[in-house]
């Protein structure tokens, strides 16, 4: 029973994330292009490390799993 509930919640979270990504152009900020993300442009290459995006995603997932674990 708990596994089914967890899968349903995980599916709902994935739907919300998918909607946010598809509406990316209409949001006041771009997911994956937040201030603090590291971009190094070379002559023939680009290195991109989404530092702030990773931290924000980590905080959100921590809160979601903490709320799921409380039940």
Image: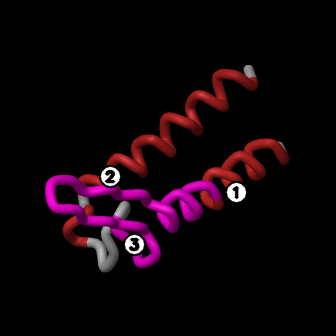
Classify mark 2: helix, strand or loop: helix
Please tell me whether residue 44 belongs to the stretch shown in magenta: yes
Q: How is the image coloured?
A: secondary structure
Q: Quadrant of residue 43?
A: bottom left
Name which residue lies at 21% across and 53% down: 45
Please, which residue is most extreme toward the front here? 43
Please tell me whether residue 13 belongs to the stretch shown in magenta: no
Name which residue lies at 41% across and 67% down: 38
Name the residue that disc number 1 marks. 63
Tag 3 near tag 2, CB within 8 Å: no
Q: Quadrant of residue 59?
A: bottom right
Q: CA distance from mark 3 to mark 1?
A: 20 Å
Observer-side mark, 3 or 1, equals 3
Tag 3 near tag 1, CB within 8 Å: no
Taking 10 as reference, is 65 left or right? right
Classify mark 1: helix, strand or loop: helix
**Neighbourhood count class around disc 2 (C-alpha, 10 Å): few under 14, some 14–19, many 20 upward:** few
**Mark number displayed over residue 34:** 3
Q: Quadrant of the N terminus?
A: top right
Q: Position of residue 21 (x, y in %)?
A: 31, 54
Q: CA distance from mark 3 to mark 2?
A: 18 Å
Magenta span covers which residues? 33-58
Name the residue that disc number 2 marks. 19
């Amino acid at each position: 029973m708990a596994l089914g509930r967890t899968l349903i919640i995980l599916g709902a979270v994935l739907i919300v994330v998918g909607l946010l990504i598809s509406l990316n152009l209409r949001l006041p900020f771009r997911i994956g292009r937040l201030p603090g993300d590291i971009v190094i442009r070379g002559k023939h290459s680009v290195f991109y490390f989404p530092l702030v995006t990773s931290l924000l995603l980590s905080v959100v997932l921590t809160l979601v799993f903490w709320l799921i674990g409380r039940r």
